[in-house]
Amino acid sequence: MWASFVANLLLLRQFICGAALSFLGLFLPVLNTARAIITSDLESQREYLTYWSVYAATEAYQVVFLFLYPNHYDAYPPELKLLWIVWLTSPYYQGALRIHVFLIQPLFESLEKSID
């Protein structure tokens, strides 16, 4: 009895976090990106381009991690990724800009000549 209740509770948790991730991490940024493009707001375009590059790096990291450690699919709780996405998209914290400035930009600048 309790085992099925706990299993259903975990499934509900994953469903709620997945829906919130889809809404906060994909749907709202797509709408705001489209709005920035339509209104030709260059600052918003830069902000969302930064978000999408950090989001893509996050997803690439997750794919590589799952490829290397396939048995650790549930290694982190879905709430952790939800908090990560909220931090990335938050205008107060500007997480995507921070990750871009302190991690992605220096990495790209150091590898730019070998990439070109």
Image: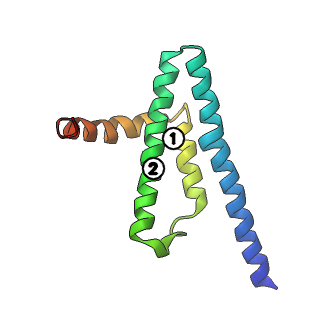
| Between marks 2 and 1 in the image, the one whose residue lies nearer the viewer | 2
Residue lying at the far front in this picture: please name it. 116
Q: Nearer the viewer, residue 4 or 70?
A: 70
Is residue 35 depicted above or below 55 in this figure?
A: above
Q: Residue at x 70, y 51 (%)?
A: 19
* Secondary structure at numbered mark 2: helix
Is residue 53 depicted above or below 31 in this figure?
A: below
* Secondary structure at numbered mark 1: helix
Q: Quadrant of residue 40?
A: top right
Q: Residue at x 55, y 54 (%)?
A: 81
Answer few, some or many: residues within 10 Å of disc 2's Cα (few below 14, many 20 plus, some between 14 and 19).
some
Q: Residue at x 59, y 51 (%)?
A: 82
Of callouts 2 and 1, which one flags the residue occurring earlier in the amino acid sequence?
A: 2
- Disc 2 marks which amino acid? Thr
- Direction from residue 16 to residue 64 in the image, left or right: left
Q: Where's the C terminus, which quadrant?
A: top left
Q: Which residue is mark 1?
A: 88
Q: Position of residue 22 (x, y in %)?
A: 65, 47
Q: Which residue is mark 2?
A: 58
Q: Where's the N terminus, which quadrant?
A: bottom right
Q: Nearer the viewer, residue 33 or 80?
A: 33
